Image (cartoon, rainbow, N blue to C red):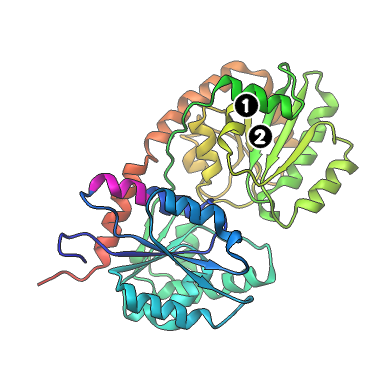
């Protein structure tokens, strides 16, 4: 800890883009600057495989808020050359607390023995099953997390899962993701975007945002939307923003369902704010989630939400009043929910009104105060 009582944080990030865990770290740093007279004492370690451009989105965001960062380069999957780089960075930066945000980082801190040298807070955001490498790290995580000083996770179902995997219950803390309300997007900007997508003013826009991986349930969404198209006279369009391993498969499915003129696969969008601004209804069809950032973003943009009742989503629904919940993998149920919110303007208004209560519980200030308290829990008290 520094002389003025601030904590020297070292946050490990495995992202290329500003999504999920990376957003939460950036929000913590932004909020920390408001609570301290001097800039945040957080430094980020960013893993990079390939040319510098692969992390350009994330490194640019770090620079924009004045977050210092260092890069650890890896040549390939399971490159053990990252180990001495990480150990040297920790030795040089001498952090008060290590803050990991992904299964690989969890494993590296445990494997190197750094967990025995520096207090360690591991943030568990949930698991994906997109690749053999990821599945391997997921299995190792039950070993890794048992050594953490604290394990923070985003929802109570995840906490229960961690306990079943052997993480001591007294070390677990539940803390959802923060959300900062968006700036208003101009009508001119929204109109320009609609025009570029070929959307006339009478078309109702459904939007889904997230990585195109199996557990996100986009295949279910396409089947449900196809059913909706077959029985609806109202002009509708589905926009799916994100990239990932399922992109080619989803593109083929759009063609097979003959809804090419009703669906736009947008790929990854750096400026997602304007898509929320033009959306009429947001859809989260996931099979597995924690407290999804995209759901909070939709709420912050004032867009009514339809989502599957998985992970921490029911906890975010304010008793089912802020999110229209539907069972996972239930294509007919999802189609019915989309139809209901499409035609019920009173329901849409109620959903967006109730969502404001959820947003009040997930402000960056609350997030900062909660995490800051957890970090201070693990630092040995000065005598």
Kindly indicate the quadrant of the structure image that contains residue 97. bottom left
Q: Is residue 331 visible?
A: no
Task: Give the SS element for disc 2.
Answer: strand
Q: Which segment is the magenta one? A: 28-35
Q: Which mark is residue 278?
A: 1
Q: Nearer the viewer, residue 171 or 249?
A: 249
Establish if 108 lies above or below 69: below
Which of the two discs, 2 and 1, sits closer to the camera? 1
Residue located 44% across and 54% down the image: 62
Overall secondary structure of the magenta section: helix
The N terminus lies in quadrant: bottom left
Q: Quadrant of residue 203?
A: top right
Q: On screen, 358 above or below 242?
A: above
Q: Position of residue 299 (x, y in %)?
A: 51, 32
In the displayed structure, 288 sits above or below 285; it is below
Q: Identify the image quadrant of the C terminus.
A: bottom left
């Amino acid at each position: 800890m520094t002389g003025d009582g601030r904590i020297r944080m070292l946050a490990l990030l495995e992202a290329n883009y500003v999504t999920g865990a990376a957003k939460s770290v950036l929000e913590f740093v932004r909020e920390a600057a408001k609570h301290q007279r001097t800039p945040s004492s957080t430094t980020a370690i960013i893993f990079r495989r390939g040319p510098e451009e692969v992390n350009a989105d994330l490194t640019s965001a770090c620079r924009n808020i004045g977050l210092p960062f260092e890069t650890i380069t890896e040549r390939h999957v399971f490159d053990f050359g990252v180990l001495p780089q990480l150990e040297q960075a920790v030795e040089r930066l001498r952090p008060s607390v290590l803050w990991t945000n992904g299964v690989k980082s969890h494993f590296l801190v445990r494997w190197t023995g750094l967990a025995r040298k520096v207090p360690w807070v591991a943030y568990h955001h949930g698991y994906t099953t997109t690749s053999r490498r990821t599945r391997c790290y997921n299995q190792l995580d039950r070993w890794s997390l048992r050594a953490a000083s604290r394990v923070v996770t985003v929802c109570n179902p995840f906490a229960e899962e961690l306990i079943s995997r052997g993480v001591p219950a007294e070390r677990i803390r539940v803390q959802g993701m923060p959300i900062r309300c968006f700036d208003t997007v101009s009508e001119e900007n929204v109109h320009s975007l609609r025009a570029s997508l070929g959307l006339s003013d009478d078309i109702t826009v459904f939007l889904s945002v997230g990585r195109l991986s199996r557990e996100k349930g986009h295949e279910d969404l396409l089947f449900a939307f196809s059913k909706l198209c077959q029985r609806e006279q109202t002009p509708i369009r589905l926009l799916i923003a994100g990239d990932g391993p399922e992109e080619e498969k989803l593109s083929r499915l759009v063609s097979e369902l003959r809804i090419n003129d009703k669906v736009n696969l947008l790929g990854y969008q750096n400026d997602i704010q304007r898509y929320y601004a033009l959306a009429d209804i947001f859809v989260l069809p996931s099979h597995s989630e924690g407290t999804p950032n995209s759901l909070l973003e939709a709420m912050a943009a004032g867009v009514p939400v339809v989502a599957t009742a998985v992970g921490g989503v029911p906890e975010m629904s304010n008793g089912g009043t802020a999110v229209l919940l539907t069972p996972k993998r239930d294509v007919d149920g999802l189609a019915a929910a989309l139809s209901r919110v499409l035609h019920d303007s009173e329901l849409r208004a109620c959903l967006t009104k109730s969502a404001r209560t959820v947003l009040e519980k997930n402000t960056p200030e609350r997030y900062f105060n909660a995490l800051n308290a957890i970090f201070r829990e693990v630092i040995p008290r000065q005598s």
